[in-house]
Amino acid sequence: MSTEKKQKLDEIHVGNEVFVPMISEEQLQKRLAELGKQISDDYQGKLPIFIGVLNGSFLFMADLVKNVTVNCEIDFMKLSSYGEEKISSGKVKMLKELNADINDRHIIIVEDIVDTGLSISYIEKLLEPYTPASVKVCSLLLKPESLKYQVKIDYIGFEIPNKFVIGYGLDYAQKYRNLRSIYVLSE
């Protein structure tokens, strides 16, 4: 099959917009194995708690912890800063709080994507009163060109340009999270 014909088959049409493959399922799984090893090495002898930021992080976090070899716990929080839009509203709203006790715990915040850094900044402020033993951030995707807040991302899956992406947990109006690869809006 010619490359041009295959490309057409891999496109995803959303209304008048076309999304094309950016990061394949194979690339994702390879990088998750690397991140899992790095986190396992860094947390030897510790019991980290992974805190997934819903809804976007659920696929990434599930696959990530499968690659972590140290004992760990998981919990989730849910924030909203997008609604049904492709760009952040600039305001973060808490929709689901943590269930776990995080005092004196080694926390790894798991995000699907960090673009402006607003959500991570918000979460870090939320966690301060709990006096965690440590807080690190793991994000599948980072858009360095979009950062507006000074945040440190400790574990990065992939750096990507400032373009809209869907798939592997990332949505467009709550759809397309179930795609096995990550797709980018075509120009």
Image (spheres, rainbow, N blue to C red):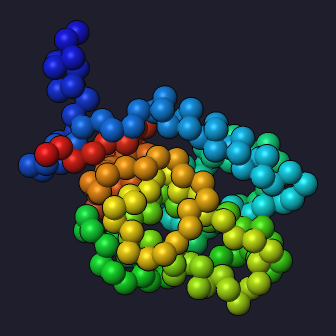
Kindly tell me whether residue 108 is visible in this rendering.
yes
The residue positioned 52% from the left and 72% from the top of the image is 151
| Residue positioned most to the top | 1
Residue 63 sits in quarter: top right
The residue positioned 60% from the left and 79% from the top of the image is 124
Residue 132 sits in quarter: bottom right
Q: Position of residue 101 (x, y in %)?
A: 78, 78
Depth order, front residue of 65/90: 90
The residue positioned 60% from the left and 85% from the top of the image is 126
Determine whether, in the image, residue 72 is placed left or right of residue 125. right
Q: Position of residue 176 (x, y in %)?
A: 33, 48
The residue positioned 9% from the left and 49% from the top of the image is 16
Q: Position of residue 5 (x, y in %)?
A: 16, 18
Determine whether, in the image, residue 34 is placed left or right of residue 133. left
Residue 128 sits in quarter: bottom right
For the N terminus, the image quarter is top left
Q: Position of residue 172 (x, y in %)?
A: 29, 57
Determine whether, in the image, residue 182 is placed left or right of residue 9. right
Kindly tell me whether residue 59 is visible in this rendering.
no
